[in-house]
């Protein structure tokens, strides 16, 4: 399982967010460049509709592929009370020929994206938190990662995730929520599918972070 929240930020405030994250996490950022292929199948006779994502990490010397399946999210009163989404997720390293295999299995390419930005990986209260900040582009031609246009110009996606289990998800969710509080002046993070837009305090918070960063 994983805990996840998402938000958006204007590109002009991303540098301030990076300074804030750097200060909070105490680790170096990692560059992020990922080619994402979303595949869908069915519903066919005897099989339910299914969606998988193939992710190709283009930052590695040799492109490294991962397959990711996001399953159902936790429901019920307990799930409603926490401000992060807890969902099933399976991720596995795969060989690069796997796209053909998924086509043979009846999957079709639904859409593909290029995600470029940076990530921070760190520990908080025992939780292994990953924060990614990225701009998402679509490809003008099939698989042409060097020929893209932004999906939401001027806006970047922020995602905070942490692995969890049925035993520890409430602690992990609490650690993620507590961390998100620090980012609140710059962006609002909420459960995926509940986009809340940019926050009105972002410009002022960014300005103060930038001047602090410049004089320290
Ligand atoms: C919760 O469980 C997951 C999966 O076993 C593990 O990766 C993570 O480190 C655990 N987190 C905490 C805070 O115990
Ligand atoms: C989305 O956010 C609003 C405002 O924070 C909240 O009232 C609503 O319940 C949320 N919806 C979901 C599906 O989480």
Image: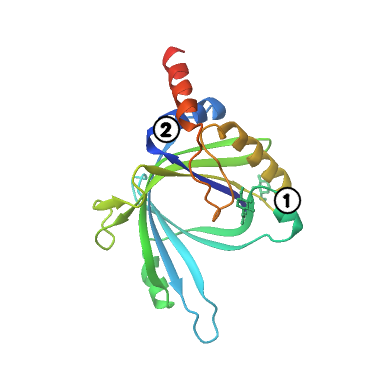
State the image coordinates of residue 62 (x, y, percent, origin top left): 34, 49
| Few, some or many residues within 10 Å of mark 2 (<14, 14–19, 20+) | many
Please determine whether, in this image, residue 45 is positioned above or below residue 126: below
Please determine whether, in this image, residue 166 is positioned above or below residue 203: below
State the image coordinates of residue 82 (x, y, percent, origin top left): 70, 48
State the image coordinates of residue 12 (x, y, percent, origin top left): 38, 33
Residue farthest along the bottom direction in this orientation: 45
| Few, some or many residues within 10 Å of mark 1 (<14, 14–19, 20+) | few
For residue 143, what is the image quadrant?
A: bottom left
Q: Are marks 1 and 2 in contact (CB under 8 Å)?
A: no
Which residue is depicted at the point 66% across and 47% down? 83
What residue would you read off at disc 2?
A: 13
What residue would you read off at disc 1?
A: 81
Which residue is depicted at the point 48% across and 65% down? 52
| The N terminus - image quarter | bottom right
Q: Nearer the viewer, residue 52 or 183?
A: 183
Which residue is depicted at the point 66% across and 36% down? 178
- Pick whichever of labels 1 and 2 is earlier in the sequence: 2
Which residue is depicted at the point 38% across and 37% down? 11
Q: Tell me if I can see residue 12 in this picture.
A: yes
On whether ligand 2 comes within 8 Å of the CB at mark 2, the answer is no
Q: Along the horizontal axis of the image, is 47 left or right of 133?
A: right
Please determine whether, in this image, residue 175 is positioned above or below residue 98: above
State the image coordinates of residue 166 (x, y, percent, origin top left): 72, 55
On whether ligand 2 comes within 8 Å of the CB at mark 1, the answer is no
For residue 128, what is the image quadrant?
A: top right
């Amino acid at each position: 399982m994983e805990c996840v929240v998402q938000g958006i930020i204007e590109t002009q405030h991303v540098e301030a967010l990076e300074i804030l994250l750097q200060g909070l996490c105490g680790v170096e950022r990692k560059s992020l460049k990922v080619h994402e292929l979303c595949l869908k199948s069915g519903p066919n006779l005897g099989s339910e509709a299914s969606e998988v994502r193939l992710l190709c990490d283009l930052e590695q010397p040799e492109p490294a592929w991962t397959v990711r399946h996001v399953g159902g999210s936790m429901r019920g009163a307990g799930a409603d009370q926490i401000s992060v989404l807890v969902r099933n997720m399976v991720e596995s390293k795969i060989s690069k020929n796997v796209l053909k295999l998924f086509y043979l299995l009846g999957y079709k390419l639904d859409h593909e994206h290029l995600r470029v930005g940076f990530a921070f990986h760190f520990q908080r209260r025992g939780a292994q938190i990953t924060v990614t900040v990225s701009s998402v582009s679509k490809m003008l031609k099939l698989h042409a990662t060097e020929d893209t246009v932004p999906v939401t110009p001027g806006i970047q996606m922020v995602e905070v995730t942490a692995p969890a289990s049925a035993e520890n998800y409430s602690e992990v969710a609490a650690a993620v929520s507590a961390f998100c509080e620090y980012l609140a002046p710059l962006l609002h993070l909420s459960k995926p599918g509940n986009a809340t837009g940019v926050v009105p305090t972002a410009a002022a918070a960014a300005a103060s972070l930038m001047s602090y960063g410049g004089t320290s």
